[in-house]
Image (cartoon, coloured by chain):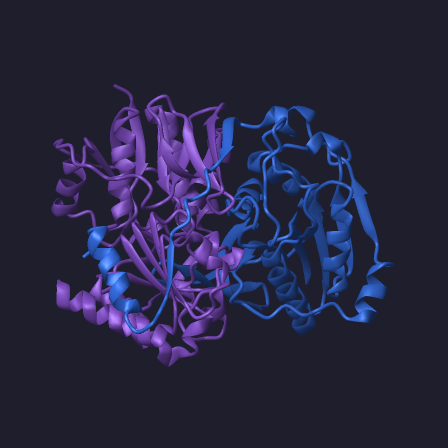
Chain colours: A purple, B blue
Amino acid sequence: MSDVLVLAEHHESEIRKVTFELITAARALGTPVVLWLGTGCSDAAVAALGSFGATKILVAESTDVTDHPVVPGAEIVASLIGSMQPVAVLVASSADGKEIAARSAIKSGCGIITDAVEIASDGTVTQSIFGGSTVVHSRVTHGTPIVTVRPNSITASQSAATAVKENVAIAISDAAKLVSVTNRNVVEKGARPELAEADVVVSGGRGVGGAEGFGVIEALADSLNAAVGASRAATDAGWYPHQFQVGQTGKTVSPSLYIANGISGAIQHRAGMQTSKVVIVVNKDAEAPIFELADYGVVGDLFTVVPQLTEEITKRK
Amino acid sequence: MKIAVCVKQVPDTWAEKKLKADTSTLDRESADGVLNELDEYAVEQALQLVEANGGEVVIVTMGPERAAETLRKAISMGADAGIHVLDNNLAGSDAIATSAVLAKALEGRDFDLILFGSESTDARMSVIPAMVAERLGLAQVTFAQKVNVEGTTLIAERVTDYGFDTLTASLPAVVSVVEKINEPRYPSFKGIMAAKKKPVETLTAADLGLDPSVIGAGAAWSAVADFAARPPKPAGVVITDEGAGGTSIADYLTTSKFI
């Protein structure tokens, strides 16, 4: 069967969930071959990738790859498109993923589709656009299809294979090393799951009223093992860090459960969470547009409703 | 220093966006066209860099006739000139073709920096800056939350999923910015008046020496098979809290097996 090249999304040796979703999607198209850029590809990582059906893990861990963002990765992907002739390349819709996809598409003369939520075995890609209001089916018509897949859209399933690790030695051009990383600043994310791939997201907006108000949001999130999100109103006001912003200019999330607290539901915000499966809303204002999305909504003060909910959840667990 | 800022006219953020049945492309006529919000941050950053280091700011756009309004709007913030790539044959261009057009419009003009907003609010692909950098063979510094220039060295902070990376590169470079980077200014009355007199070059694909076979809908490397509006979500249950609102949500979560 033909190979499908999957770019692993990982932070050091920690594999992001979307990687398993990509391998699952790749199995419908052919034989998943994983490309691992950078260090951290431990034996455990190889075994984990194999348990989802990856047959081969190609590892490129030279400092050429780790010291320079995006472009070396794109050169390696483009080179592998040439040598492996895969039937498709699947990449996560992360900042790096999309840009590696973009540059390798130009290098290899291949069409690109971003933010897929589903890929059929015939290569038809489903996208959910305009904040989830329109569903589009499309296909790449030129070269090897390069598709970026939105995290949490495809359900990962295991399919045991024995993965073999192989080092790839692909020379990186000087043109790919024009930008150097001089420092990596890792912001402590704590024990909560990563926002883009969390199964449950609890978020707060203007109604939270201030940075200290996020305490009740975090407590509810922790009772559900959820990620915390924030509306742009809250991050612009400096109440919660920018990287937790959900919406048009922030992260797009698609969890099983989204709990919006004190968020009015401006299009800006809805565009980032509208594809959530179940939406719960708590808001003082009965007219807030976010209630249109609610499967279950409570008109009330979040500072009484949310702590009561947290307490009930803790009691029932 | 000489800075280009690439901007895009997009449907008003508040308008409902639709695809056109005949071309499967965005219906741009049914909504007001506005300057893509994130591009305002790129213009602001360019103006701040020129205020600190001297130089000029050129706004570049590709789009139909009415995109000229957006170009003027961006110039009215304080830029010096504009380039408008205007050609009916460009309609329906995909990201691959759009990046080819922008690269042609930008090359050979000795820009030290080419700035973009990190995404457009309509297509939301976030790939054009990387594609333009690829085509021009320039350093790429995207998703920047901070940009400084010292001599010919660019020092920037790139937002990552884990925090941010500090990057350095030599100019010239392609940079995209996130909205955290600054607070865009409003055009002043003086700026709006002055913008009317700033030079704008209007160029066709032929002027740029672009092969007609690489632009427009016919040259796209992907094609829409079909699309449909997602059926509206059935209305949910909304109650007013009378003391047990939190408990009622917990009941709902228990019934739906979340707890």
Q: Is residue B165 above or below residue B220?
A: below
How far from the left and from the top, in percent, is residue B41? 60, 63
At 78% from the left and 42% from the top, the residue drawn is: B65
The one of A195 and B211 positioned closer to us in this rendering: A195
Residue furthest to the right in view is B197
The one of B196 and A134 positioned closer to us in this rendering: A134
Q: Quadrant of the C terminus of chain B?
A: bottom left
Q: Is residue B57 above or below residue A141?
A: below
* Occupied quadrant, residue B237: bottom left
How far from the left and from the top, in percent, is residue B197? 87, 59
Query: Residue A99 vs residue B249: left or right?
Result: right
Q: Quadrant of the N terminus of chain B?
A: bottom right
* Occupied quadrant, residue A49: top left
Q: Is residue B143 visible?
A: no
Q: Is residue A8 above or below residue B54?
A: above
Q: Is residue A157 visible?
A: yes
Query: Residue B41 vs residue A237: left or right?
Result: right
How far from the left and from the top, in percent, is residue B90? 69, 33
At 71% from the left and 54% from the top, the residue drawn is: B59
At 52% from the left and 61% from the top, the residue drawn is: B178
How far from the left and from the top, in percent, is residue B168? 47, 62
Query: Residue B129 vs residue A76: left or right?
Result: right
